[in-house]
Image (cartoon, helix red, strand yellow):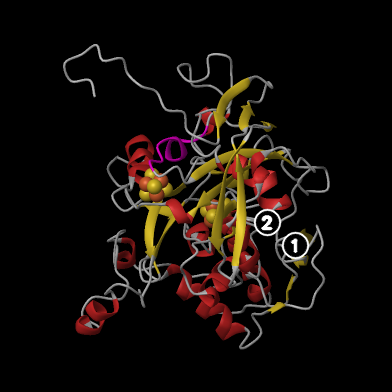
Amino acid sequence: MPDVYNWQLGRKMSYPFAASPAQWQFAFVFNTNRCINCQTCTMACRSTWTFSKGQENIWWNNVETKPFGGYPQNWDARLLGLLEDHNPGGQVWDASAPRTPAAPYGRFDGHTIFEAAAGYAGPDGPKAALGYLPTPAEWTSPNIYEDHARPEGANATAARMNAALPEHKVWFFYLARLCNHCTYPGCLAACPRQAVYKRPEDGIVLIDQSRCHGYQKCVEACPYKKAFFRPNTGTSEKCVGCYPRIEGKDPELSPNGEPCETRCMTSCVGKIRLQGLVRVGDDGAWVHDPHNPIYYLVRERKIALPLYPQFGTEPNGYYIPPRWVPRPYLMQMFGPGVESAIEQYSCPDRELLAVLQLFRTTQQIIFRYEIIPGPKIAEIEVSMPSGGTRTQVIYNDTVIGYNKFDREAVRITIEEPVFERPAAHANSI
Ligand code: SF4
Ligand code: SF4
């Protein structure tokens, strides 16, 4: 197995597939603090790509209520359990490992899904990645336990008491998910037909339908369970990253060929989503580009964290973690960067606050941002999660986002402008 460098793990790892890195990588940041679970993203994707016969249980985008919801049910707990059984007590991060730009979260000392499958000799032959095939029942009910802080019926009386104000003793949050277009995809490594491929121009992972024979090895090996089997075609399908929009081929949105965000991103009501493309070097690492908003949030500020980095696929979906959720749960889900990310998000400095305004302000993909300083408008005391207070100074800066051709795509100020309508109509207020 060739060795590759996985920066999310802070070390090299074995990956059973040799390929040249993509030149650009599809990536996105979701702010979980803002998701309202409206499922608009889910239906935008559904109505574009998976509304046909045979796709009834195929949801490329879904939003699940954590900790109990999941699509398919218990997908993450199941895989964490498989890895723990394989390496009891060993699935840990080395907290003392130095944090460097190449290893920003320290080092993961456990086994990835690829390393856990090395030497596997079961009745079903060798495996490229540790995984499992969900049952048909687990693919139903994509909203199971929606808005539930604990399973219904487990202890209904206690659940009601715990939800009483002023203090919430139970918690939940919404986790929006789609294919992470991983740098080292489990689905790709596992396909015996080499039907799964990663596009060099944008890192989007696709399944060639003419090569797929429906063996479902991708479904088994994707740790995020974002490859799906479609019974009436006998093939597997997955998110295509709305690639015509990424290519700037939508005649309505991209008259000049500007890359646009996907359907799920552009429809987001809660403004939790920012999608982008980051440049990748010949060595497979992201090219230093601190004014690309995705690069800035993920690599410069480390405020947006990968989902279950310990699986080892180097997913390209990143999440600003929810502030109210117990830290051990979040650290299992997003790795050791959680405390720092939440601390920064609770009291963003001037530049971070400006970049956070860019979420869902344009359908075009922003390749570069610029900040024009404005006057000071407020000073507020913020209670920090780690204790104590901090003073946040807010300036009415202007943030400009530029598209692929370095043309201005959006201009927005920190303080939302107020417009007063002239009293020209009977219902004017
Ligand atoms: S999330 Fe799953 S389906 Fe998507 S690229 Fe990664 S391994 Fe493949
Ligand atoms: S559209 Fe946005 S706010 Fe609504 S559920 Fe999807 S991610 Fe959450």
Q: What is the distance, in whole Å, between disc 1 and disc 2 at their CAs? A: 8 Å
Q: Can you tell me which quadrant of the image ligand 1 is in?
A: bottom right
Amino acid type, mark 2:
Lys
Identify which residue, 210 or 8, lies in the foreground: 8
* Picture residue at 68% right of the left edge, 34% below the top: 201
* Picture residue at 69% right of the left edge, 45% below the top: 296
* Ligand 1 contact, mark 1 (Cβ < 8 Å): no
- Determine the residue located farthest toward the left in the rendered image: 426
Residue 74, position as x, y percentages in the image: 40, 71
Asked whether, in this view, residue 155 is left or right of residue 116, the answer is: left
Q: Is residue 264 magenta?
A: yes
Q: Which residue is mark 1?
A: 104
* Picture residue at 60% right of the left edge, 52% below the top: 392
Residue 170, position as x, y percentages in the image: 36, 75
Q: Is residue 221 magenta?
A: no
Residue 339, position as x, y percentages in the image: 62, 68
Other-residue count near label 2 (Cα within 10 Å), few / some / many at <14 / 14–19 / ≥20: many
Q: Which residue is mark 2?
A: 302
